[in-house]
Image (cartoon, rainbow, N blue to C red):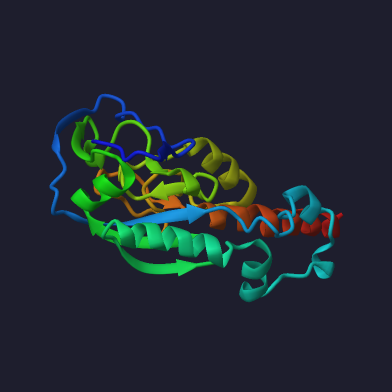
Amino acid sequence: MAVFRGFAPVTGSERQPAAGATRVADADPDESLSVTIRVRRRPDGPPMPSLGDLAKIPLDEREFPSREEFARLYGAADDDLAAVAAFAQAHGLTVTGQSAGPRTVMVSGTVAQMNAAFGVNLGRYESPEGTYRGREGPIYLPSELGAIVESVLGLDNRPVVRPGLTDRAEGLFGLPRHVGVGRAEAKPSHRAWGGQDRMGRVTPVPSVLLLNVFVVLLPARVWAAGRRR
């Protein structure tokens, strides 16, 4: 796939085929898909508090910002969202939504449009675990967006599950044994825990839910244990 002059690879976007996978064909150029472009936090905003900082604050003294306040403090800048949306529209993609809080711009289009916009060559891959739409190499974006865009999610829909963190979460919080915790280029599923994707793998728990588990449930468990002594 030809890359336009002035485009640069997105840091951390390099992909290789899944273990044992073989590219069998180009993806259907007319196939429709939706992609989420995640941008940086607003440069003039305060740093996000760490888990350590939050753990030092007693539960009854914690203050939780509203969604609007969170977006204002830690979300994306309007100019960054507008720049990404303008890029997408210039390449024939439809902007289906954007939000400062989660720092995302959602776009839709065909495989052919995505290939041209992001400098990729999407294909169909067969692996021992099934068939998926994937790519190899990095994603490319205009150089001026290099400092703005953190990731492009949804081009590659292979599933990825990391069970190690799941096991620790299950032991700490009594989560169901079938919960999968993972991160993939494919966007997080919002189906019920224990659902399976079309490759038969367990549904990942979105990372924001896992963060809530550690920020809220862990201090609560510690507090309860202290009360029983």
Please identify the residue farthest to the front as the structure is shown: 5
Residue 157 is left or right of residue 218, and the answer is left
Residue 62 is left or right of residue 130, and the answer is right
Q: Where 201 falls versus 17 (above or below)?
A: below
Q: Residue at x 55, y 57 (%)?
A: 209
Front residue of this view, candidates 139 and 48: 139
Q: Quadrant of residue 66?
A: bottom right
Front residue of this view, candidates 228 and 187: 187
Front residue of this view, candidates 81 and 209: 81
Q: Residue at x 33, y 45 (%)?
A: 118
**Image quadrant where one finds the C terminus:** bottom right
Q: Position of residue 102 (x, y in %)?
A: 53, 62
Q: Is residue 102 visible?
A: no
Q: Is residue 167 visible?
A: yes
Q: Position of residue 16 (x, y in %)?
A: 33, 28
Please identify the residue farthest to the right as the structure is shown: 229
**Image quadrant where one finds the N terminus:** top left
Residue 134 is left or right of residue 166, and the answer is left
Q: Where 71 falls versus 5 (above or below)?
A: below
Q: Position of residue 211 (x, y in %)?
A: 61, 53
Q: Residue at x 47, y 52 (%)?
A: 205
Front residue of this view, candidates 69 and 179: 69
Q: Position of residue 146 (x, y in %)?
A: 50, 44
Q: Residue at x 77, y 70 (%)?
A: 63
Q: Quadrant of residue 120?
A: top left
